[in-house]
Amino acid sequence: MRDYIDAAAFKEMILCANAALHANTQAINDLNVFPVPDGDTGTNMGLTMTNAATELRKKDFDTIADAASCVSGALLRGARGNSGVILSLLFRGIAQRLKGLETAGAAEFTGAMVDGVTAAYKAVMKPAEGTILTVSRLASAAAAEAAEQGLERSLERAIEAGEEALADTVNQNPVLKKAGVIDAGGKGYMVILSTMLASLRGEVSSETLSEPAAAEEKKPAGTFTEEKVEVPEQNIFDTVFTVRKKDPNVDFSAFVSYLDSIGDSLVVNDDEEIIKVHVHTDIPGDVLAESVKYGHLELAKIENMYLQAIDKLGGRREKSTDDLYGIEEELEAQEQGEEPEAEPEKEYGVVAVCAGKGMEELFLNNLGADNVVTGGQTMNPSTDDILRAVRRTPASTVFVFPNNKNIIMAAEQCVGLTKKKVIVIPTKTVPQGVTALLNLNVDDTEQQNVANMTEAIGQVHTAMVTYAARDSEFDGRSIKAGEHLALIDGALLNSYPDVDSLMKDLGNAAERFSPEFITIYYGADVQPEDADDASAVLKARFPDAELSIVSGGQPVYYYMIAFE
């Protein structure tokens, strides 16, 4: 029986917890109360924990304090969604308590768990019971009370108390009770805690637990997007390169035959001195190695079409070789021991989070944002993603618009991580972000701007139209996968078989807002004529309101509608 945790044991406990979290990602995601295709809790916690596992694997540690500090810093920067941020706060408190220790016994480690909960509660503006906070608090308290019985027994008690608390979350949280599920974040916490104990006892190891080589990003299950995006299953690498011939008369017919045998979409152009090749293949490295038999490899571009398709399905910007320029700058800066940070050229700068080409153009070109972070419901950006955008912004004060309630906490963690002053405007939807940014005045003081933008947010009511990603029950209603869903200010209005009936119901529900302005942002899966038809329903309902239609190009949500 183990009496203490050293650096090696703690590292292995975290690596095991990471693997277990990924193995349970879908089970945790299925606990989300609404069947909308959002940034699910299991996915966010898994991606956050993977950041810690990645950093831990880079080195060995002499003390548990050093290992815990590494985990804390990695979780902070990699935190995604509210669940990921709270997870990082729990481990931040643990790291602070373990500071200066080589090992930790029962008293030290359980005390650190309690400090982690304290740190998390302090950071959450309005802590709600029936969440991961409740589960971690009761589990940590039980562990501390049992500390005199030894390390393993105290963790056993934490798991027992945590499981009881988790089962009771359905009774503590009204929304969970309507959906008839336990808290997803609390479930993720218990997976981590139970796996850490199993690792400490030698019952599991990071080598035997199934863990993905990289964090899998969830693809929303829908009925529209997948018809428009083809996900290749073979020959996934789009490979383009040029070879400068050693001999102008070289016969490369055998090379063409080889390329034809290992790929498709083959195009070869013989340009006297240069051979130009385009091919889709699964073995681009072999292709390039073969090419040097015929000359000098001059230029090459390789892009993973499978990941590009997955990113497009998930509402994320597809990566291309164009991104290598920024990566090169980042790596060069790291080599010099510093990260690039733009010098201030003005007082105020803006970073906004959104998804969709139209939305990005709106924020950057029409509203004057300096940088856009790609993200939203299907993929919550990490603290580090937002921080990099802040650092690239040439201003002394940077206003960050998260535009999603599940991204606000991750954005707030940027405060103190840069020499720039970061002010997070708590926008919960993209329409709120648009209206808030319209109220930013470069001639006003910081306090005036914050007050004006915060007041403007309160005038915006947002309706979202999406689809049910899975069958579910909510508040006594049966919802079938593929049905249209309408939400107003985050609350589910109903499910519908068609958009026309949904819009009519939405118009009736929005009557209480007495809107003077209505803005409809239509998504990537909506044709302009369909958007016109949908807007006509609302125009008929509110003939005196000023109505605008904008091509947002956002994924997942067919319509985002602002009532002001």
Image: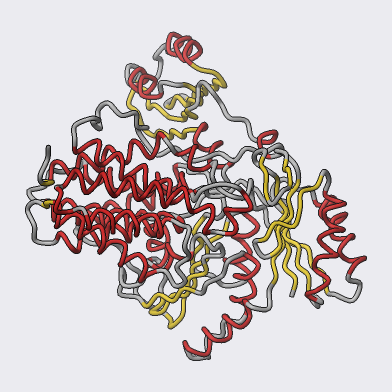
Quadrant for residue 152, please give it.
top left
Vertical arrangement, residue 118 with respect to residue 336, above or below? below
Residue 540 image offset from top left, x and y in percent: 93, 65
As drawn, 273 above or below 129 = above
Q: Position of residue 350 (x, y in %)?
A: 49, 72
At which x and y percent is residue 116?
Answer: 28, 61
Q: Nearer the viewer, residue 127 or 486?
A: 127
Task: Please state, as top left, top right, bottom left or bottom right, where the C terminus lies in the image.
Answer: bottom right
Image x and y of residue 363, in percent? 59, 66
Q: Depth check: 509 or 474 in front?
A: 474
The residue drawn where x is 42% and y is 11% is 251
Q: Foreground: 351 or 44?
A: 44
The structure residue drawn at horizontal position 65% and vertical position 39%, both measured from the top left corner, is 470
Foreground of the two, 358 or 336: 358
> Which residue is at 52% across, 32% downward?
305
For residue 526, side relative to residue 209 (left or right)? right
Q: Relative to 400, is 456 on the left or the right? A: right
Tell me: residue 351, above or below residue 443: above
Give the colour scheme of this rendering.
Answer: secondary structure
Q: Is residue 333 visible?
A: no
Q: Quadrant of the N terminus?
A: top left
Q: Residue at x 19, y 63 (%)?
A: 96
Q: Is residue 239 visible?
A: yes
**Is residue 243 found left or right of 261 in the rendered image?**
left
